Amino acid sequence: MECRVLSIQSHVVRGYVGNKSASFPLQVLGFEVDSINSVQFSNHTGYSHWKGQVLTADELHVLYEGIKLNNVHHYDYVLTGYTRDTSFLEMVVDIIQELKRANPNLVYVCDPVLGDHGSMYVPQNLHPVYKNKVVPVADIITPNQFEAELLTGKNISTEKDAVEVMDLLHAMGPDTVVITSSDLPSRLGDRFLVSLGSQRTVHPDGSRSTQRVRMDVPKVDAVFVGTGDLFAAMLLAWTHHYPNDLKMACEKTFSVMHHVIQRTISYAHELAGPGRRPSPPQLELRMVQSKADIEDPAIVMEATVIS
C-alpha cells in the first residue's frame, strides 16, 4: 500500500536541513514524499553567509490549491518543522484540518520548534499558535524539554515531572509524544542525555493504555544542524512500521540517529585535522553515505519501559 507524506519544511541548496534531511530517508524507507519548501536558502544559517527566499502564507496556499485542483491531495502523513511566521503556521493548520477531513486517518507529525536551553529562537507570538492551534491537531510531536515545558507551563526536574508533562501534552491532542532531549540525569553518567517517550493507545473496546519509555543517548561534542528534522522523519517512518510499539519505534529511530551522527563526526574530524574543531560545512550530515543504516539500522540504543 503506497504511503504518501506531505512535508512542509525548509530547503537548502547545499547540505541537509528541513526537507533535505527528511525526504531522502523517507524515500529510502518506501514513502512517497511531496515537499513544499517553506524557505529556499543557499545553506543553513549556521554558515557565515546565506542567501535565499522565504515562502509566504499566500504562496503556500497557492501551491496547495494547485495540488487540490488536480485532486491529488490525499495524504497519509503531514510532517512540519521550523517556522518563523505565524500566518504561515496558521495556514499549515488550515491545510492539515482540510486534509484530515478528506482522510480522517491522516497522521500529523510535528516538531514544535520554539527554542532550547531556556531561550526561544522563534518570535514569541508563535508560542500561542503552537499551543492553541498546532498541537491540538498533531498526532505525534517531538519537543525538546524546553519546548515541552513551554507548551504545558510545567517544569521538568524529575522523571515523574516528565511523565506528567507528556500526559498534559496527550490531553492537548497528540497520542505520541517524544521528548527528544532533557536535562534529567542519566543512569549511565554525565556523558549521556535522557530522552523520554509516551504513546497513548485507544483499544477497540474504548479502553486506553499508555506505553512510556526512557532512552539514555550518548552526548556528542559538536553542533549539528538538521538532526531534529531527520529525527521527526524517522519517528514518522518507524511508528508507521510499529504503530503500537513505541519502544521498538524509538530504538530504530535513535539507532539511525546514532549511526548518522557517528559517521558525520568521524568524517568531520578527518576533514578538520587533529586538534581543530570542524566547521559547519564539514559537519553536514552524511546522509547518502548512511543509506544502509537508514534502511535497516543495527539497534545500538535500547529503550527502557518505565510504565
Image (spheres, grey):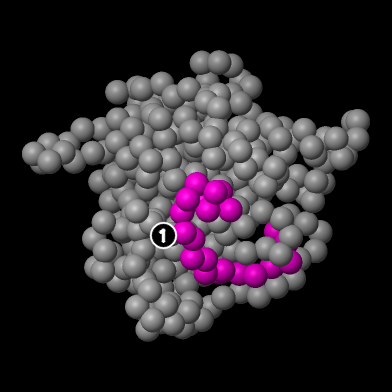
Q: Residue at 28%, 51% (x, y): give it.
A: 173
Residue 206 in view here: yes
| Residue 74: % across, % down | 34, 67
Residue lying furthest front: 1
Amino acid type for the residue under numbered disc 1: Arg
Frontmost residue, 177 versus 270? 270
Q: Is residue 32 magenta?
A: yes
Residue lying furthest top: 188
Q: Along the horizontal axis of the image, is 49 left or right of 129? A: right
Residue 198 in view here: no
Q: How many marks?
A: 1
Q: Is residue 90 magenta?
A: no
Frontmost residue, 36 versus 127? 36
Instruction: Determine whether 57 is above or below 198 in the image.
Output: below
**Residue 246 position by quadrant:** top left
Q: Which residue is mark 1?
A: 4
Q: Along the horizontal axis of the image, is 177 left or right of 147? A: left
Which span is picked out in magenta? 24-45
| Residue 16: % across, % down | 66, 54
Instruction: Determine whether 146 is above or below 296 in the image.
Output: below
| Residue 218: % across, % down | 61, 26
Q: Residue at 42%, 35% (x, y): give it.
A: 249
- Secondary structure, mark 1, is strand
Mark 1, residues whose alpha carbon is within 10 Å: few (<14), some, or many (≥20)?
many
Q: Residue at 44%, 33% (x, y): give it.
A: 250
Frontmost residue, 49 versus 95? 95
Q: Quadrant of the C terminus?
A: top left
Q: Residue at 39%, 29% (x, y): give it.
A: 247
